[in-house]
């Protein structure tokens, strides 16, 4: 999850995360980020401190008081030692000061997830398919699948939603960078490509609603 109100920065971070194989949930305000964090289905959060509505540190403290233990990487324009310590004391797992390089952000995020989940728990398995969410490697049986970054993100999204109907709109919202428009026909093309690589029977079309995996 990315909680950042600067749209340009959010788009840049989101794009880097997507290209690195992550599925991104995004919130622009502290209040929306807080509510999204309560859902409990997130691997990690990137949290800006200077947010409209509920301040970032208050969001973080509220998550921790509710027992939300996902790793949180804090972003801030503030660089004082005291503010950094305050953030860590309220439950942050890592801290980056703006401006920063997005490759370092992605690397730190991977490290946080790896430490919190463990290698074994980072592998999703279903019907002979397995994907490693840390290394972005997918296998069908013992065969390594040659997937594009978008195909991997799509497969990962489906494997987190086994048995659920996923609409084309939902796929577009979660798999493309913020403010980047794509049509439903593009999704259909990628669905077709993915079916050829993992088996056409694994993704079913639910007419008028979307797709169901598994």
Image: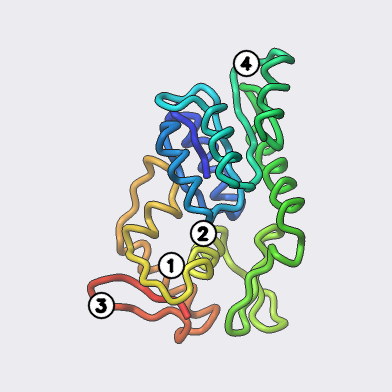
Q: Which residue is mark 3?
A: 207
Q: Identify residue for label 4.
A: 78
Camera-side residue of 191 and 83: 83
Q: Secondary structure at mark 1?
A: helix
Residue lying furthest front in this view? 65
Indicate which label's residue lies in the foreground, 3 or 1: 3
Q: Is residue 24 above or below residue 152?
A: above
Disc 3 element: loop
Mark 3 touching mark 4, by CB under 8 A? no
Q: Which residue is mark 2?
A: 150
Q: Position of residue 174 (x, y in %)?
A: 43, 53
- Crowdedness near tag 3: few (<14), some (14–19) or many (≥20) residues, C-alpha within 10 Å: few
Q: Nearer the viewer, mark 2 or mark 4?
A: 4
Seen from the viewer's position, the closer of residues 181 and 60 is 60
In percent of the image, x 52 and y 64: which residue is there? Answer: 151
Q: Which residue is identified by label 1? A: 190
x then y, percent, for residue 43:
60, 52
State which tag comes first along the sequence, 1 or 2. Answer: 2
Which image quadrant for residue 60?
Answer: top right
Label 2 secondary element: helix
**Which is closer to the viewer, label 1 or label 4?**
4
**CB atoms of marks 3 and 1 within 8 Å:** no
Gap in Å between the C-alphas at discs 1 and 2? Answer: 8 Å
Mark 3 vs mark 4, CA separation in Å: 50 Å
Q: Position of residue 42 (x, y in %)?
A: 55, 52
């Amino acid at each position: 999850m990315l909680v950042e109100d600067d749209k340009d920065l959010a788009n840049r971070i989101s794009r880097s995360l997507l290209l690195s194989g992550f599925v991104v949930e995004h919130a622009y305000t502290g209040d929306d980020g807080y509510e999204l964090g309560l859902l409990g289905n997130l691997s990690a959060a990137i949290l800006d401190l200077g947010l409209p509505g509920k301040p970032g540190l208050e969001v973080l403290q509220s998550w921790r008081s509710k027992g939300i233990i996902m790793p949180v990487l804090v972003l801030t324009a503030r660089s004082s030692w005291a503010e950094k310590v305050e953030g860590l004391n309220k439950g942050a797992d890592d801290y980056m000061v703006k401006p920063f390089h997005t490759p370092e952000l992605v690397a730190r995020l991977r490290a946080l997830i790896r430490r919190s989940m463990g290698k074994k728990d980072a592998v999703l398995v279903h019907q002979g398919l397995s994907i490693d969410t840390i290394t972005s490697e997918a296998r069908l049986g013992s065969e390594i699948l040659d997937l594009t970054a978008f195909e991997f993100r799509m497969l990962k999204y489906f494997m987190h939603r086994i048995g659920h109907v996923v609409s084309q709109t939902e796929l577009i919202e979660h798999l493309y960078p913020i403010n980047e428009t794509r049509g439903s026909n593009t999704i259909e093309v990628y669905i077709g490509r993915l079916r050829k690589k993992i088996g056409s029977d694994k993704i079913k079309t639910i007419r008028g609603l979307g797709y169901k995996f598994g």
